[in-house]
Structure formats: structure tokens, C-alpha cells
Image: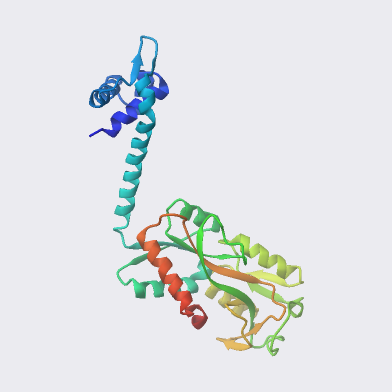
Amino acid sequence: MIDPSEIKSFITVAEERSFSAAARRLGLAQSAVSQKVKRLEDQLSLHLLDRTSRRVRLSVEGELFMPYAHRLLEMHDEAHRAAALIRSQRGSTLLLGGYNFLVEERLRLVEHFLELNPTTQVDVHHGTRQDLYHRLSSGGLDALIALALPGQARSDLDFIRIERRQCHVAFPLNHPLASREAITYGDLCGHQLAISPGRQDAEILNVITTELTRRGIELISAPEADRRAIEQFAHVRGLPHLHWYPSQRVRHERGSSIVLPITDNVLLTDLVVYFEKGRRRQVAERFAEAIRDYVALGLNEAAA
């Protein structure tokens, strides 16, 4: 059986055209590199390198064998990667990224996933949009629950769209607009509105705040991005705040607020779950199956 380290030594010597340079690059003694190449030549019964006192170069047989040497080394590396992937699938912990703002949506998705996979654990990781995308792309996360503008989900990642969310406004009971059946953005002109500070997803928030401020709405940032914290902040300050549903709803009560639809609604966001493209851990595939099942059953509509 050919030793991959012998193949690697042969390729490195051929690239460096020097046993001493190859030894430095491989972190081995020069004698060890020479022995590995000699063993390979003996095993193959081939003369792979022409050696002189000044230089080393590929022989004719070495030139012919080199493509096969590269393929052997690539297959060896691929086999090790496959083994590492298989070992990683022994674990039963889903590494899930998300924002504090989407905690309710995340809890519903995780609950459905755990109903289908009761022995699996879920480890939730928080961070900024940029940080979470980087961790997902580099294999540090199995999935990421995030927001995207309609039709603008990232093409470099696989994703499942859970719902398209429409903006509504939740008013305190004593707010002058709370008696309406519906509102327009123009009705909000000159009014204050509590909003997320958007530290975790500034890109989406910038689109929303730009649309609202250009319509003359004064935005007051809540101290935290957690939706319950925003609602509490709005309640204490007597301010309306945004609320999102997967479809337009009629006027209704929600806790101590009256939620109204916006008839000229232009603020839409997609709730998506991102996955790394290509081969994924088995636990990530199971999570994707659970998300598709969640959407197919209409559980997002039922929970809203």
C-alpha cells in the first residue's frame, strides 16, 4: 500500500526542485524526505527523480506518474474530510444562529423540530447579521433564522422561506388612532413610533426606518432588540410599535394594544432559514425537513 506521506514528499520535492527546500516546507529532516521518495520509487519500481549535485528534476517516468500522484493525494484528503463529516454526524446537537428580535419565531420552529427529533439538542448562538452569516458559511453553524427583503435572500446560501411578513401597528388603547379600523402611513405622520435598535440586523432596519422617516414618522429606539422588551418599552412610554404577521389582519386586540393593518403597506420582510450550500451535517438536514413540514402544515399562520 502506498503511503500518502511518500506521495506528498515526492510532489513537494518535484515542486521545490530541492530535497532541502522540500524538507523545510514539510517540516522534516532532509534524510527523512529522501527515504520516503526512495521507498516510493522502490515500491513502484519507477525512477521518479533525476538527481544531480546542483538540482533535482522529474524524470520521464516521474512526469508520467505525477498526475496520478496528485489524484492519489486528493483522494486521501477527501477520504479524511468524509471521515470527519461522518464523525461529526455522531453528535445530536443542532447549532442554530438567530437574532433576539426573532426569539418567538425561533422558539416555535425549535419546538416543532424537537417534537420530530426528541433526542436532539439545540444550541442557539446570537450575533450580528454579518457575524452569523460568516459562522454559517464557515461551518460554525448548521442553520440561521433571519430576515430578508422580499426576493433578496442570499444566493450563496441555501434557504427555506417560512413566510412573507406584513407590517401592522400596535397602538396603546388611549392613542388617538386606536379607534380606527385601519391606517395609512400618512396617518402616522407626526406621531412617534417605538422601534428596534437594530444592532443585530442593521441592514433590514435601515430599509424600514428610511421608509418610515421619509413619511414624517418620528422613531424612538427601544433599548433592546427583544420583541417583548420593545413592547414593554412602548407600553411604558405610551407609544405605538410595529407588529408583523404572515398576512394582513383586521383590527384586533393584542394584550393591552389595538393592532391595525396598514392599507398602503409597502413594508414587507421574508422570514427565512439559511443553510450552508452543499453537503451538510445530518442534524441540519433533519432541521430542514422539520422546517418544510412546519410550513406545509401552516403552523406559522396558526401561531401568528
Residue 300 at x, y percent in the picture: 50, 78
* Residue 224 quadrant: bottom right
* Pick the front one: 82 or 41: 41
* Pick the front one: 113 or 48: 48
Residue 260 at x, y percent in the picture: 65, 84
Q: Is residue 13 left or right of residue 250?
A: left
Q: Is residue 19 left or right of residue 235?
A: left
Please give the name of the residue rendered at 29% of the width and 53% of the height, measured from the top-left corner: 87
Q: Residue furthest top?
A: 53
Please give the name of the residue rendered at 69% of the width and 80% of the height, measured from the top-left corner: 262
Q: Say which quadrant the N terminus sits in.
A: top left
Residue 302 at x, y percent in the picture: 49, 83
* Residue 109 quadrant: bottom left
Q: Is residue 145 above or below residue 182?
A: above
Q: Is residue 74 above or below residue 92?
A: above
* Pick the front one: 97 or 275: 275
**How many numbered marks does the figure carry?**
0
